[in-house]
Image (cartoon, rainbow, N blue to C red):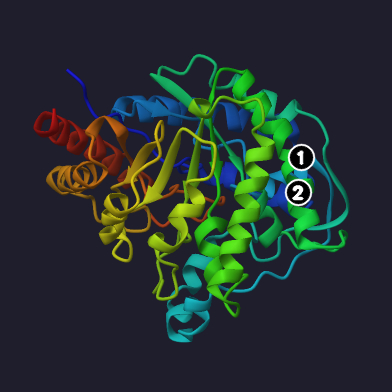
Amino acid sequence: MPRILTTHAGSLPRPAALAEMHGRRSRGEPIDRDELRDAVATATAEVIAAQHAAGIDIGNDGEQARESFFTYVQHRMTGFGDASQRAVMRDLSEHPDFLELQIPRFQRIKVNLFGAAAAIGDVAYRDTSEAEAECALVADAPFERTFMTATSPGIVAAAMENRHYGSMEEYVRVLGRALAVEYQFIVDRGLLLQIDAPDLAMERHTLFADRSLSDFLEWIALVVDTINDALTGIDPSNVRLHVCWGNYEGPHTHDVALDDILPTIYRARVGALVVSMANPRHEHEYKCFARHPLPAGMALVAGVIDTTSNYVEHPEVVADRLERVAQAVGDPRQIMAGTDCGFDTSAGLGDVAPSLVWEKLRALRAGADLAGDRLF
């Protein structure tokens, strides 16, 4: 019998000691590289085993080898240094009382995503040694298929300031050429490549908060075109694209509508989209896939688990969400069950208690089984 496969969006809880080491390395402080390597290897083995026990079909390394989902590039590429000045999301800046409530969360952060290294010289991929070490840790992972994440050129350009190139477009294109090295390396290792591109939605209320929707749509068209160039020669079936509005609890009152961006995102030459659909701001947008049918050959990983709440979804809730998505898409064979985003997008930044992450992933499996029984 067919069934609904389960996966997630990438990052999983890092042990506290590992998060601390990533934080020190991110700030340029000295670390014991052998100690970091051993800690990464141990943590990776543990999250692989935990995913398998929870019933995840398409799993990964939990990004244990990285400090965050995008600032890791400063260790793999040339040209980065100093510190950026990233704007706070518009919805957060409008509610200082909410920001005050978030102070304990900010104090847990080990990597400063709002002060990431900036581009101050020629950006190029230095070598693949770190990517090789990371891929080697999942070589024998017990999943039906193993994925490896890599960042989008758009989120790097948006959050790691350009202080070197003549235009933002030039910077994005250079980043695309650099990241193409990593994309190809991952696929050549037989892994499923996931490109993390929150910029395709989130930058509407950050970098483009004071600009028009048409300006933002031009931005995502540039990023998608750059990603396509970086994927030249790679079979789309080996790639999936993750899009979200920012993995944080907050008002999200300025989030761009999925209806507005989906047609442009569909231009990406990928085999699947990973889209947030469990959080209260975007749960209704499963209906978009009835209005904008998936392109031929493209699957949808539906986010049916919220990664910012410690509520553990009931399997019936997960099943109901998947059934609605399947109805909108029109064919349950085109959907998979996933999470809205990662659970630890930057070292120390997770909102969900680690023990509850695994409860949520078990609920994902149980709900996918219920939905599969009904749909097939």
Residue type at mark 2: give it: Arg
x, y percent for residue 219: 63, 61
- Residue at 69% across / 32% down in the picture? 182
Checking the image for residue 88, the label placed there is none
**In front: 39, or 157?**
157
Q: Residues within 10 Å of mark 2 (few under 14, many from 20)?
A: many
Residue lying at the far left of the rendered structure: 374
Callout 1 environment at 10 Å: few (<14), some (14 to 19), or many (20+)? some
Q: Secondary structure at mark 1?
A: helix
Which image quarter is the C terminus in?
top left
Q: Are marks 2 and 1 in contact (CB under 8 Å)?
A: yes
Residue 280 x, y percent position in the rendering: 28, 64
Q: Is residue 28 left or right of residue 362?
A: right
The amino acid on which the numbered mark 1 sits, given as a three-letter code, is Arg
Instruction: Pick the residue in front: 281 or 204.
Output: 204
Q: Nearer the viewer, residue 66 or 282?
A: 282
For mark 2, give the secondary structure: helix
| Residue 264 horizontal side relative to residue 66, left or right | left
Residue, x 38% and y 46% (percent of image)?
Answer: 354
Rendered location of residue 30, percent (x, y): 79, 46
Residue plotted at (54% across, 37% down): 269
Q: Is residue 6 visible?
A: yes
Q: Look at mark 2 in the image and give the residue it sits on.
A: 173
Above or below — where is 179 with respect to 289? above
